[in-house]
Amino acid sequence: MTLLATIQKTKHETPPRILIHGAEKSGKSTFSASAPKPIFIRTEDGLNGIDTDAFPLALDAETVRQQLMTLVKEEHDFKTVVLDSADWLERLIHEAVCKKEGVDNIIRAGGGYGNGYSLAMNIWKAIFALLDRLNREKGMIVIVVCHSRIVTVNDPLHEPYDVASLKLHTPKNGNGASDMLKEWADIIGYSRIPLLISDGKPLSDTSAGGNILILGNSPGCLAGNRYGLPHELPLSWRAFQAAFKQAIKSTDTTTTKEA
C-alpha cells in the first residue's frame, strides 16, 4: 500500500474541540453542562447549583491525568468531556513542577531563565494528548473552560488596544499554555455579559435577554472558529448546536455544488 492510499477526508473527521472563556460567573460552566452527556474534570469547585456528572475535585495535575486516562481506557457512555478550568489547572501544573524541582516558585524551577515554564509545558502537552485521544478514539466533544483577563495588544499597525484573552501564562516567545490552547481549539468562544454604560458606570443590560457567546474574530476579545459559525449567539447549548448543525450543512452543500 502506498502513502496515497492513506489519504483521508478531514473536514468533519472528529467532534469539535471548544475553548470557552469569560469573566467569573458568566455562564461558561452552565453552557458546558448542557452539552451532550457531559463529564467534568474539575480543577476548581465551581459547579454548585449545576446538575451534571463530574469526577471528584482534582487537587493535583496527576489526578487530572488519571481521570482522563480512565475515560480513555474504560467503557462509558459520556459524549462530552469538560475541563473546568484551564487556569486552575495551570496552578496545579506549576505546583507539580515546583515539587519535582524542589523550589517554591515556578520561576526558579529548572535553574531559572524560564525553564520552569518549559517543564510545565510538558505536562500541558501530556494532558491535551489525552483530550485529543478522547476526541479521536471515543468521538467525544471536548470543552475547555478558562477565565479571562484583559491584556493590552501592541499592534504595529494600530494604537495599543485592550483585549479579553486567556488567564494563562503567555510568554513573548509564543510557547506558553495560552498559545497552545489557541492553536488547539477548533472553536474559541467568549462568554460576554451584556452591559449598558450610564454616567461612566457599567450596568447589566437586561434587554439583551441573557449572556452572549462571541464566536467570530473580534478586536475586543479572543474568539474565532473553523466552521463559519455566526459572529455571536445567545449563550446556550441549544442555540450553539443549531448554529453548528447549520454551518456543517451549509459547508457540505457548498462542497457538493463545487464538485
Image: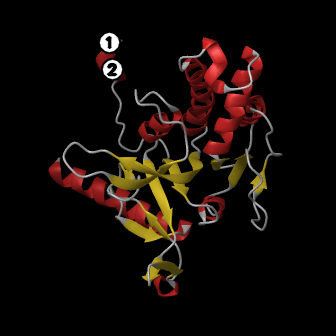
Q: Nearer the viewer, residue 205 or 187?
A: 205
Residue 77 makes an appearance in the image: no
Q: Which mark is residue 2?
A: 1
Image color mode: secondary structure
Q: Is residue 120 above or below residue 165?
A: above
Name the side, left or right, on which 210 lies relative to 222.
Answer: right
Residue 119 makes an appearance in the image: yes
Q: Residue 83 placed where, x, y %?
A: 65, 45
Q: Residue 148 placed where, x, y %?
A: 53, 53
Q: Residue 164 placed where, x, y %?
A: 45, 55
Name the side, left or right, on which 63 lies relative to 182.
Answer: right
Mark 2, Cα crowd under 10 Å, few <14 / some 14-19 / many 20+, is few
Q: Residue at x 40, y 45 (%)?
A: 12
Q: Nearer the viewer, residue 58 or 103?
A: 103
> Quick one: SS at disc 1?
loop
Q: Residue at x 36, y 21 (%)?
A: 6
Whether label 1 touches label 2, CB < 8 Å: yes
Question: Image quarter for residue 242?
Answer: bottom left
Q: Is residue 65 above or below residue 97?
A: below
> Quick one: SS at disc 2?
helix
Q: Nearer the viewer, residue 59 or 196?
A: 196
CA–CA distance in space, label 1 to label 2: 6 Å
Which residue does the numbered mark 2 point to in the structure image?
5
- Amino acid at the residue labelled 1: Thr
Q: Residue furthest front?
A: 199
- Amino acid at the residue labelled 2: Ala
Q: Residue 86 placed where, x, y %?
A: 61, 43
